[in-house]
Structure formats: C-alpha cells, structure tokens
Image (tube, helix red, strand yellow):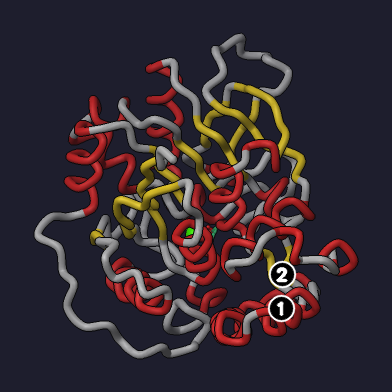
C-alpha cells in the first residue's frame, strides 16, 4: 500500500491527542512529524503533551517540532480552562524527557513539503502555517492536501457568537492562509463546528471502548474526564465534543463528510473577529478556496475511530450502531 505522508500541526490538547491516536493507528498514512503551535496549551506544554501521547502509543519514532509561541499579532489566549492545567485533562501523565529536535516546526514543514508530496492536517491555530507562508511560500504551495479543524458556517461559535477557537486565537494567521490559498487557486477542507459538534464521545461510548480494550479505554477516560466535566458545566452536554479526530477521519475517508465549495474569508477585527465568512451564495463572485463540510455520518466516524484505535475489524463493533 502506498502510504499518504502527512504532518499533523496541532495544539495538544485533549481532542488533538485523540486525533494523533487515530492517525498513528491508520495504516494508510505515514505521520512524518508532529508540529506544535500555541493554542489550547502553550507551545512548550503542547510539545511535552505530544511526547506523552507518542509514548502511550509506543511511537516515539515520530519526531515532534516546537512551533510558534504566540499568534502573529493578537495576544495569546490559551484554552487551558477547557483542557485542564496540564493541557491533557489534568491527567498529569509522566513527562517524557529529551526528544528535542535541531530545527523548529516551520523549518521542518518547509523542508518536508519541498522534498515530496505531503499533506497537512491542521488541528490548532494556523500560526505555524502563516509563518511558513511568510518564510517559504513555495513550500506552502506544495501542500498536497490541507485539512483544517476550524471555523464554522452556520453553527454558533465557541469563543464568540460566531468564532471557533482555532481561527479566533490567531485570526490574522487564518486570514493569511485562506487569502493565500485563494491567490494560489488552491483549496482547504474546512472541518468546522457544523460537523464536529455532532461528534460527541458519550459515557456509553467510552464504556464500550473500555470493555473492548481496557488499557486504551482507561487512557482515554483519564484524559477526557476534565473535558466531560467542562462540557456539562458550559454546554450542558453529557459527553464531550471531540473535534480534531474528525479531521483525521475525513482525511482517511472523505465520504464521512459532505459539503460544498465556497469562497471563505476570515475576519480579523471587531466583534466578529475570527469568524469564517462563508460566501455560500457567491455574492463576491470569487473563486472558491474552501470545501466547507456541513454534514457528517456520525456512525461511520465512530466505526472508523474505534476500529483503528482499538485495532479491531469494523464488523467486530457489533453493537456500536445501538450506542450512537
Ligand atoms: O474549537 C475547537 C478546536 O480548538 C479544537 O482543535 C481544539 O483542540 C482547539 O484547538
Ligand atoms: Ca486542536
């Protein structure tokens, strides 16, 4: 099988961690490296958390690169209120020593993208990608496929009435990425809140995971408990919305989500700062730069997610349909 090469740019982060687990257990893809950006956690914490996930997955062969410590222009606002003081649900997993790389995230992205066909799955604020555009525009233009968990079309925001965290945290970076894609005639796949809000890891699903594989299940329980409590407190949801794994699942199987092509621009100021403005009616007569995903097959997602992280054939998940 010809593996598709990817780089995961992320801000681990609880759901980022679940996304990394899915990517590492999917034979279709080869994770060339993980680049860390300031977001849920400060970049140093995200670097440490990525190593903790790699150690849990016995995959410390995958390099992790430190990226941008702050947004292009805005003051940096983390999301530790959502992800816990350690950025991993206050699981306080043991530190993984060493593992420092000689180069940073942007240089790694630049070298990898110029060398061969590589896709990027962006799960955090787009600061690293924006710096890549500024430093090595040809490398950015070489991205084979760019999938972003971020933005929102018609679903309400999670940082303001209209803005989703990844694009709200660094709107200038997101705007530069979307504008550059438009100028280059390229597309981004926007896995926004319209679809990710439908991906809820419930207590029942978590119990099912634990019964199928106690070690994996208990690890997921450990890093998501804080996230469950957060969701009950602020959104009165029993469970937690796991945004980032959907971006990886969509990369693996695009049929999991449906949507449409549109021109999208990111607002960089005022009350709508961070909003992904989707010109679905083509008022601006601009060439589309985005595939906006709006529908998701929730069962197909969980069947893929569980079968991969648990190492089971999909048909073994015989009662999953009843649990969705
Ligand atoms: O808005 C949700 C997104 O912001 C997810 O990627 C989450 O991990 C945070 O980065
Ligand atoms: Ca994230």
Q: Where in the figure is residue 94, as x and y percent of width and height? A: 35, 90
Mark 1 residue crowding within 10 angstroms, few (<14) / some (14–19) / many (20+): some
Disc 1 to disc 2, C-alpha distance = 7 Å
Q: Which residue is painted at 49% across and 63% down in the image?
A: 16
Res. 159 image quadrant: bottom right
Q: Which residue is mark 2?
A: 201
Q: Where in the figure is residue 318, as x and y percent of width and height? A: 82, 66
Q: Where in the figure is residue 29, as x and y percent of width and height? A: 44, 47
Residue reaching furthest left? 102
Q: Which residue is mark 1?
A: 206
Q: Is residue 216 above or below residue 246?
A: below
Does any portion of residue 138 appear in the rendered image? Answer: yes
Which is nearer the eye, 59 or 277?
Answer: 59
Which is nearer the eye, 126 or 104?
Answer: 104
Which is nearer the eye, 121 or 136?
Answer: 121
Give the foreground label among 1 and 2: 1
Which numbered dot is residue 227? Answer: none
Q: Which residue is painted at 73% across and 38% down in the image?
A: 294
Residue contact between numbered discs 1 and 2, judged by CB atoms under 8 Å: yes
Does any portion of residue 161 appear in the rendered image? Answer: no
Q: Where in the figure is residue 266, as x and y percent of width and height? A: 52, 35
Res. 263 image quadrant: top right
- For marks 1 and 2, the one nearer the N-term is 2
Secondary structure beneath label 1: helix
């Amino acid at each position: 099988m010809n593996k598709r090469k990817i780089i995961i740019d992320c801000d681990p982060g609880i759901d980022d961690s679940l996304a990394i687990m899915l990517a590492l257990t999917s034979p279709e893809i080869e994770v060339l490296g993980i680049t860390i950006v300031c977001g849920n956690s400060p970049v140093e914490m995200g670097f440490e958390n990525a190593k903790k996930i790699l150690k849990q997955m016995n995959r410390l062969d995958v390099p992790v690169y430190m990226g941008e410590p702050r947004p292009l222009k805005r003051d940096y606002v983390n999301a530790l209120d959502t992800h816990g003081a350690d950025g991993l649900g206050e699981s306080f997993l043991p530190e993984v020593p060493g593992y420092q790389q000689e180069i940073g995230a942007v240089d790694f992205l630049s070298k990898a993208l110029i060398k061969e066909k590589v896709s990027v799955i962006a799960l955090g604020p787009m600061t690293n990608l924006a710096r890549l555009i500024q430093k090595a525009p040809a490398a950015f233009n070489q991205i084979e496929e760019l999938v972003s968990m971020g933005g929102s079309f018609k679903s309400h925001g999670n940082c303001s009435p209209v803005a989703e965290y990844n694009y709200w945290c660094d709107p200038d970076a997101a705007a530069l990425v979307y504008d550059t894609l438009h100028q280059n005639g390229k597309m981004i796949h926007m896995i926004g809140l319209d679809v990710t809000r439908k991906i809820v890891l419930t207590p029942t699903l978590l119990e099912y995971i634990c019964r199928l594989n106690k070690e994996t299940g208990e690890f997921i329980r450990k890093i998501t408990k804080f996230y469950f409590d957060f969701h009950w407190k602020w959104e009165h949801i029993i469970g937690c919305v796991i945004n980032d794994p959907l971006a990886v699942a969509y990369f693996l199987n695009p049929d999991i989500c449906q949507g449409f092509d549109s021109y999208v621009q990111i607002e960089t100021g005022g009350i709508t700062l961070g909003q992904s403005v989707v010109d679905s009616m083509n008022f601006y007569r601009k060439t589309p730069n985005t595939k906006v995903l709006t529908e998701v097959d929730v069962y197909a997602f969980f069947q893929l997610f569980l079968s991969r992280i648990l190492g089971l054939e999909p048909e073994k998940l015989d009662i999953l349909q009843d649990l969705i």
